[in-house]
């Protein structure tokens, strides 16, 4: 085992902070920390620009003015979408600090769309009671945010480690000291083995896990890497049963599925079933719309429904990227109804953090989709994700710069650190017993096929609607695939191991939650049960239900 330091090579001086991941949460943290005078490294398995952030369409929900809106309304909408599992203090932080972070991003060079009066153009999306979503390039907001942050990161970071695959957290003496990672072939002259990338603080900003599913809007990079590393290190994670399915992914073989932004419905596009009838409030929260679609598709025996945007004026001018994608596949939104079906989109849960982004493991921080800060609860409100990355990325940076080192019992960590829990037993061992880098058991297999098989099993067993039987079938399939998986020697085998570990945890926890709430719909438990207003946590290989109910 060798060590890597700043500059991508070995032993060139220690890093103060290693940020793993290069989406909005990671890069906005890196930028703030570097500007604050720290030596920051950013490690990513692809190039800096390759993150889920760049795929984000809709925009950023933030109250930037306007008489009809307020942060109290934004708070109320977020809590309503979160179906009783949001942490109110975390949401308060999100809505109050969000506007400042958007303005900072603009100062860093991001260009948002302006209306005719010279003020921000604002869209309304599902679950929002006011038009408060600011956007860039029509529906290319993530790409614009990422462009501004990547440019600034290259100017400020002490080390940019592109093409490095993080294998596991380095945990020594009850503290995180960085990661073990595979360097890109030939980059360091250190051979093919794992390398230690050490830092005083480590920030997980690795994004989500949409690649668990066969049908997803997430890019190939979204393989739950940070979540899997945290699970293997025993760091508490919560709310992972709440994979949000976006209702209006284009029904088309392209993967990731092209997204037809919720902003289209905000502008008046209509959902129609196979008979051409409307069947749901288009601006209801996403979980409600996806569930209504799944049920209508089952009743009508079809694999997709329709988005009718024929009544939208100036479609091409308002949504140029979506218009170009549709044109490329021969669809004209002015005359064609657009085929749609729900697709895995966003993991509402993740690694538990306090209100400053500290995890339960000193030295380890998390922000963005990999984290469970409590702002999303059981179902994220549209366009709150870029916002969460900016707000909590900034908070953890300020905390590190101020000398903080470990978690405080605030936010979702309050119930975990201060209260009791009902232990439901161990998670099933998948690769956790044989961590990546150490090699998984069994004969080498076709890793790409195993990934596809897992995605199919998760789609069939843990999709928009699940039940005990479907979850058990998916778990059996995942266990079989884990037994046959090849040792972790590269990014492909490492990603498969991570997907297997995350699927294990998701399926186990989804089996525990015997109710329907937010993005977790159980056909065998169709009601929401007030007794289940509790978080399910996986920590040190065990599943526990926290005693303390989530405050209304
Ligand atoms: C969308 O534009 O519909 C996606 C935005 C989001 O996921 O919040």
Image: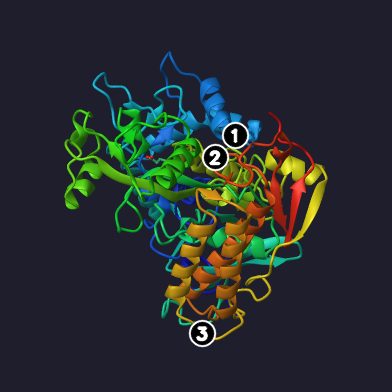
Q: Residue at x 54, y 43 (%)?
A: 519
**122 versus 491 height, above or below:** above
**Quadrant of the frame with the N terminus:** bottom right
| In this picture, residue 99 sits left or right of residue 424 | left
Q: Secondary structure at mark 2?
A: loop
Give coordinates of residue 235: x percent, y percent: 69, 57
- Contact check, label 1 and label 2, Cβ < 8 Å: yes
Left or right position of 250 against 62: left
Residue 164 appears in view: no
Q: Which residue is mark 3?
A: 444
Query: Toward the viewer: 324 or 438?
Result: 324
For residue 379, which numbered disc appears in the image? Answer: 2
Q: Residue furthest top?
A: 67
Q: Distance between the Cα atoms at labels 1 and 3? A: 43 Å
Residue 236 location (% of width, % of height): 69, 54
Q: Earlier in the sequence, mark 3 or mark 2?
A: 2
Q: Quadrant of ligand 1?
A: top left
């Amino acid at each position: 085992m060798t060590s890597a330091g700043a500059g991508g090579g070995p032993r060139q001086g220690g890093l103060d902070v290693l940020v793993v991941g290069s989406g909005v949460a990671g890069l906005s943290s890196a930028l703030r920390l570097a500007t604050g005078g720290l030596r920051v490294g950013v490690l990513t398995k692809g190039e800096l620009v390759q993150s889920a952030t760049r795929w984000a369409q809709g925009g950023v929900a933030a109250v930037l003015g306007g008489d009809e809106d307020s942060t109290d309304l934004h708070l109320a909408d977020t809590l309503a979408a979160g179906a009783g599992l949001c942490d109110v203090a975390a949401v308060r932080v999100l809505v109050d600090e969000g506007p400042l972070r958007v303005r900072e991003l603009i100062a860093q060079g991001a260009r948002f769309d302006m209306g005719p009066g010279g003020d921000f153009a604002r869209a309304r999306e599902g679950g929002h009671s006011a038009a408060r979503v600011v956007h860039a390039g029509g529906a290319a907001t993530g790409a614009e945010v990422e462009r501004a942050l990547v440019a600034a990161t290259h100017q400020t970071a002490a080390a940019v480690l592109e093409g490095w695959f993080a294998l596991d957290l380095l945990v020594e003496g009850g503290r995180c000291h960085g990661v073990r990672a595979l360097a890109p072939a030939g980059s360091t002259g250190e051979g093919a083995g794992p390398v230690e990338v050490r830092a005083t603080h480590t920030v997980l900003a690795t994004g989500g896990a949409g690649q668990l599913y066969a049908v997803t809007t997430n890019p190939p990079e979204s393989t739950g890497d940070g979540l899997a590393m945290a699970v293997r290190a025993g760091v508490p994670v919560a709310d992972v049963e709440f994979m949000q399915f976006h209702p209006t992914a284009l029904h088309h073989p392209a993967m990731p599925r092209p997204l037809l932004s919720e902003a289209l419905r905000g502008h008046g596009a209509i959902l129609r079933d196979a008979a051409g009838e409307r069947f749901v409030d288009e601006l209801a929260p996403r979980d409600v719309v996806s569930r209504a679609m799944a049920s209508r598709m089952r009743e009508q025996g079809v694999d997709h429904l329709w988005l009718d945007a024929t009544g939208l004026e100036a479609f091409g001018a308002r949504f140029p990227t979506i218009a170009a994608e549709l044109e490329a596949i021969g669809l004209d939104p002015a005359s064609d109804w657009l085929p749609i079906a729900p697709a895995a989109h966003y993991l509402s849960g993740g690694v538990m953090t306090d209100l400053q982004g500290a995890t339960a493991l000193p030295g380890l921080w998390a922000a963005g989709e990999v984290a469970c800060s409590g702002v999303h609860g059981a179902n994220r409100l549209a366009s709150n994700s870029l916002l969460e990355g900016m707000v909590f990325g900034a908070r953890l940076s300020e905390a590190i710069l101020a000398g903080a080192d470990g978690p405080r019992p605030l936010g979702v960590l309050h119930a975990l650190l201060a209260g009791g829990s009902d232990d439901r037993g161990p998670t099933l061992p998948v690769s956790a017993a044989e961590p990546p880098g150490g090699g998984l058991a069994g004969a080498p297999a076709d890793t790409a096929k195993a990934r596809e098989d897992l995605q199919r099993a998760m789609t069939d067993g843990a999709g928009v609607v699940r039940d005990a039987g479907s979850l058990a079938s998916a778990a059996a399939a995942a266990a079989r695939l884990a037994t046959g998986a090849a040792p972790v020697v590269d990014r492909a085998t490492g990603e498969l191991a991570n997907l297997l570990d995350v699927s294990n945890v998701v399926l186990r926890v989804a089996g525990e939650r015997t109710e329907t709430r937010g993005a977790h719909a159980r056909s065998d438990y169709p009601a929401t049960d007030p007794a289940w207003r509790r978080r399910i946590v996986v920590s040190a290989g065990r599943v526990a239900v926290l005693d303390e109910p989530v405050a209304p």
